[in-house]
Amino acid sequence: MKNRAVIALLAMVAAGGAAGGLAVRAGHAEEPAAAVYVTKIPHGYRDWKLVSVAREEGELDDIRAILGNDRAVKAFRDGKIPFPDGAIIARIAWAYDTSAVNNKSFGRQQSFVAGAPKNGVQFMVRDSKKYAATGGWGYAQFDDGVPADDSVMRTCFPCHQAIKDRDYVFTHYAR
Amino acid sequence: MKNRAVIALLAMVAAGGAAGGLAVRAGHAEEPAAAVYVTKIPHGYRDWKLVSVAREEGELDDIRAILGNDRAVKAFRDGKIPFPDGAIIARIAWAYDTSAVNNKSFGRQQSFVAGAPKNGVQFMVRDSKKYAATGGWGYAQFDDGVPADDSVMRTCFPCHQAIKDRDYVFTHYAR
C-alpha cells in the first residue's frame, strides 16, 4: 500500500490533482487515528478463502493473494456492493522468485513462485460507521507484524477513492 | 498439466531420457484407469486454504493459485512428508490479464490480475494404496468440469517423478 499509494499520490500531483489528494489528507489529519486505521492484525486471516491473485511489477515487484473472511467472500461471490459491515479483505504478497526446479521440468524459463514475504500484509476492514470518513473502510498495513506509520496509512484512501463505484475495492473475485 | 507434462516429456526425449519416460507410460497402461486417475472434482475445493501462488509464462501463460484441504495444508505448514492419506492439493489457473484500472492508480503499466479461468483445474489426491503405482498420488484435470482424457493424465506422473524427494509436490507453502 505504501509504494502503491505514494506512486498514486505522485501521479495525482503530476496530473494536477494535488488539491483533491491533499484535501483528503488534511481531512484525515482531523480524525482520531484510532477511528480511521486498523492497528490489530485480524485473527486467522491466513486461513481465509481466496478471492484472487495478482502480480505487481515495478517497485512493488511481488506476487500476491487477496483473501477474504466469510462475510467478504460472500459479498464478492454474490457481486453485491457495498460490502457488509464486518467484511475484511486481506492482501498478502511475496517476492516474485524464479523456480529452478519448475523450469527444469518445463524445459524452459517460465515459472515464477512466491518467495519470502514482501511489502507487508494489508487489510481493509468494513465498518460503515467507524470508518465513515474513509468510505466505510478502515485500512491497515503490517510490516513484520508492526502497524505502518500513520503517515503511510493516510495515503491509502486517496488511492482507493478512484474506484468509489466499486466500493473502493480494486480486486475482482476470481471464479 | 497437459502442456506442462507434454513439454516435460518432450524435454526428457530431447535429453535422451525417453526410455525412462516411456517405460513409465507403458507401466501406466497396465493399470486400471479408475485406480490411477481421479475422475470426480473434490467437493468444495474453492473454499480451501491457500498454499501458494505462481505465474507460468510460455504456452501456459497463466497466473495460478494452489489450495489444499485441511489435511494437505497441515502437512505443508508442518513441513512433513509424505503427505497423509486424504490430503488433496488443488491448482486453479486464470488468464494473466493486465489491469487498466490498477495501472491508472499506479500511474504506470505494472499490474496483472486473474482473468477468465484457464488451463483447467487440477488435483493431486493422496491415497498411498489406491495410487501406489503413481507415488501414492492420484492425478486429475478438469476442463470446464470434464475430466481430461486418459492420455493426458498419463503424462502427469512422469513430470512429478522428478521431485520424488519432495513427495512429488512442486509447490512450497507460502508463509
Image (spheres, coloured by chain):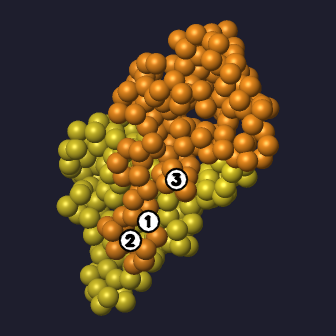
Chain colours: A orange, B yellow
Q: Position of residue A80 (x, y in %)?
A: 74, 27
Q: Are marks 2 and 1 in contact (CB under 8 Å)?
A: yes
Q: Secondary structure at mark 2?
A: helix
Of the image marks 3 and 1, the number of the one nearer the N terminus: 3
Question: The disc labelled 3 sits on which kind of residue?
Answer: Glu
Question: The disc labelled 1 sits on which kind of residue?
Answer: Ser
Of the image marks 3 and 2, the number of the one nearer the N terminus: 3
Above-or-below relation of A160 to B104: above
The chain identifier of the residue carrying mark 3 reads A
What residue do we see at 32% from left, 88% from top? B15
Question: The disc labelled 2 sits on which kind of residue?
Answer: Asn
The chain identifier of the residue carrying mark 2 reads A
The chain identifier of the residue carrying mark 1 reads A
**Along the viewing direction, whichever of B25 and B3 lies nearer the viewer:** B3
Q: Quadrant of residue B24?
A: bottom left
What residue do we see at 31% from left, 56% from top? B169
Query: Same chain, marks 3 and 2?
Result: yes
Q: Which residue is mark 1?
A: A111
| C-alpha separation, residue under disc 2 versus residue under disc 1 | 6 Å
Can you tell which of label 3 and label 2 is closer to the viewer?
Answer: 3
Q: Quadrant of the C terminus of chain B?
A: top left
Can you tell which of label 3 and label 1 is closer to the viewer?
Answer: 3
Of the image marks 2 and 1, the number of the one nearer the N terminus: 2
**Along the viewing direction, whichever of B25 and B9 lies nearer the viewer:** B9
Q: Position of residue A61 (x, y in %)?
A: 49, 54
| C-alpha separation, residue under disc 3 versus residue under disc 1 | 20 Å
Q: Quadrant of residue A57?
A: bottom right
- Tell me the number on the disc at residue A103: 2
**Along the viewing direction, whichever of A124 and B23 lies nearer the viewer:** A124
Query: Same chain, marks 3 and 1?
Result: yes
